[in-house]
């Protein structure tokens, strides 16, 4: 398969040859037509935090392997070629059911195993305070429990690669040390920790702040506080939800300037309600409203967000606008940086790399960003390739 497109880093027209699952050649081309007619080409997006789609959640006691396959497949539309299915705070039974279904789905479908480098457990060992807790259900928030985690890791087939935890929770520091020793990456999030507790978590091996600036109190002490402690640490990557609703542009710019584009990760943190039409969803425990213009809120008010309704492609395009980034800087925050954080294969637009690619149109503004084609390991999974 040969694809003519513009290289996302240089803007130069290239021809990418794919043989099997791999990029076998990249050659310069001299098209006779205007090169702005060509789509751009880049590695596919990698999102560390996807909770579900179209009303289906990964954290669901009735989740089936077919659900996992259906949820994951829908993400090719957004240029996503790798994702960490994310299970949020819920009962032990729900988490066991969710991770079991994900393992079965990955064992059943080799393409899914390639799309899922690992799973993200966000909670249940989080702050119980309103604000930091976000939309995580209070009745399932609990102290860190290594024994429980070992069970979840076992049923997942050793797929849990990232855990978001609040350092102040009972047993958290010991949990972090054990998890890091076992190869799991630890993120700090949904926390109301004091600076010393954040420091202890970093000492114990935490390397990421999960959606910094969200999962926080509406009003906090000017200093010290848990946002400064994480923002100022050179040992923590920061992930940001740049959907334009979760954090304002000045916060996005500040974090990217402080952490640099090399240590910032963009996630959409898409809710299981993402993709649903506007309306009220959920049950008596967690009722949410999908609003007309995209955001998803806890029903009955407009301040507390309940995950994002935008996907990674939109969040990257918006981050480029908000922080004045190059296309390559923006794309690396949702391709290369998550791979580096987790220590998994880095997909590059280079000979020999696995052909996880997306073709897109972009003319310099977030609204113009549109994914046209997505390939996973050399297979077209969304859109089509014109033969060239
Ligand atoms: Zn969260």
Image (cartoon, rainbow, N blue to C red):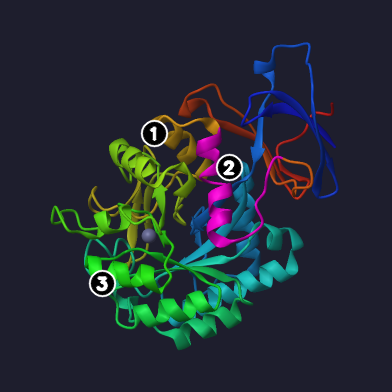
Q: Please say if 34 is above or below 19.
A: above
Residue at point 35%, 44% (across, down) = 258
Q: Is residue 349 left or right of residue 161?
A: right
The magenta region covers: 328-349
Q: Please say if 349 is above or below 100.
A: above
**Dot 1 crowding, Cα within 10 Å, few <14, some 14–19, many 20+:** some
Q: Please say if 120 is above or below 7.
A: below
Which quarter shows the C terminus? Answer: top right
Residue at point 30%, 68% (across, down) = 199
Asked whether mark 2 lies closer than 8 Å to ligand 1, one says no
Sequence-first disc among 3 and 1: 3
Q: Where residue 256 sits: x, y (%)?
A: 39, 42
Reading the image, the residue beneath label 1 is 323
**Dot 3 crowding, Cα within 10 Å, few <14, some 14–19, many 20+:** many
User: Hey, which quadrant is residue 285 in on the image?
Assistant: bottom left
Q: Where residue 279 sits: x, y (%)?
A: 37, 48
Q: Where residue 131 sits: x, y (%)?
A: 23, 60
Secondary element at tag 2 = helix
Reading the image, the residue beneath label 2 is 78
């Amino acid at each position: 398969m040969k694809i003519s497109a513009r290289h996302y880093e240089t803007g130069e027209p290239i021809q990418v040859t794919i043989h099997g699952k791999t990029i076998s050649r990249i050659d310069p081309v001299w098209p006779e037509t205007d090169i702005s007619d060509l789509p751009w080409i880049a590695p596919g997006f990698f999102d560390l935090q996807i909770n579900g789609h179209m009303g289906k959640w990964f954290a669901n006691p009735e989740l089936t392997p077919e659900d996992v396959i259906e949820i994951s497949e829908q993400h090719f539309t957004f240029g996503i070629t790798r994702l960490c299915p994310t299970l949020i705070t819920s009962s032990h039974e729900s988490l066991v059911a969710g991770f079991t279904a994900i393992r079965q789905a990955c064992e059943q479908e080799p393409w899914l195993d390639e799309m899922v480098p690992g799973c993200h457990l966000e909670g249940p060992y989080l702050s119980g305070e309103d604000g930091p807790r976000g939309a995580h259900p209070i009745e399932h928030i609990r102290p860190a429990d290594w024994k429980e985690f070992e069970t979840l890791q076992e049923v997942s087939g050793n797929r849990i690669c990232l855990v978001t935890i609040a350092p102040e929770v009972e047993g958290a520091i010991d949990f972090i040390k054990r998890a890091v020793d076992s190869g799991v990456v630890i993120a700090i999030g949904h926390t109301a920790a004091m600076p010393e507790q954040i420091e202890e978590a970093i000492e114990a091996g935490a390397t990421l702040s999960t959606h910094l600036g969200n999962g926080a109190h509406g009003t906090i002490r000017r200093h010290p506080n848990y946002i400064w402690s994480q923002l100022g640490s050179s040992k923590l990557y920061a992930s940001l939800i740049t959907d334009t609703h979760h954090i304002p542009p000045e916060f996005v710019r500040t974090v990217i300037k402080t952490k640099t584009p090399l240590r910032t990760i963009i996630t959409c943190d898409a809710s299981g309600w993402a993709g649903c039409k506007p309306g009220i969803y959920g049950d008596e425990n967690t009722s949410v409203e999908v609003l007309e213009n995209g955001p998803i809120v806890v029903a009955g008010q407009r301040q507390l967000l309940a995950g994002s309704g935008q996907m990674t492609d939109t969040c990257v395009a918006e981050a480029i606008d908000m922080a004045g980034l190059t296309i390559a800087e923006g794309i690396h925050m949702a391709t290369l940086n998550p791979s580096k954080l987790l220590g998994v294969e880095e997909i590059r637009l280079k000979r020999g790399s696995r052909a996880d690619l997306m073709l897109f149109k972009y003319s310099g503004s977030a609204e113009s960003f549109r994914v046209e084609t997505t390939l996973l390991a050399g297979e077209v999974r969304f859109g089509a390739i014109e033969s060239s």
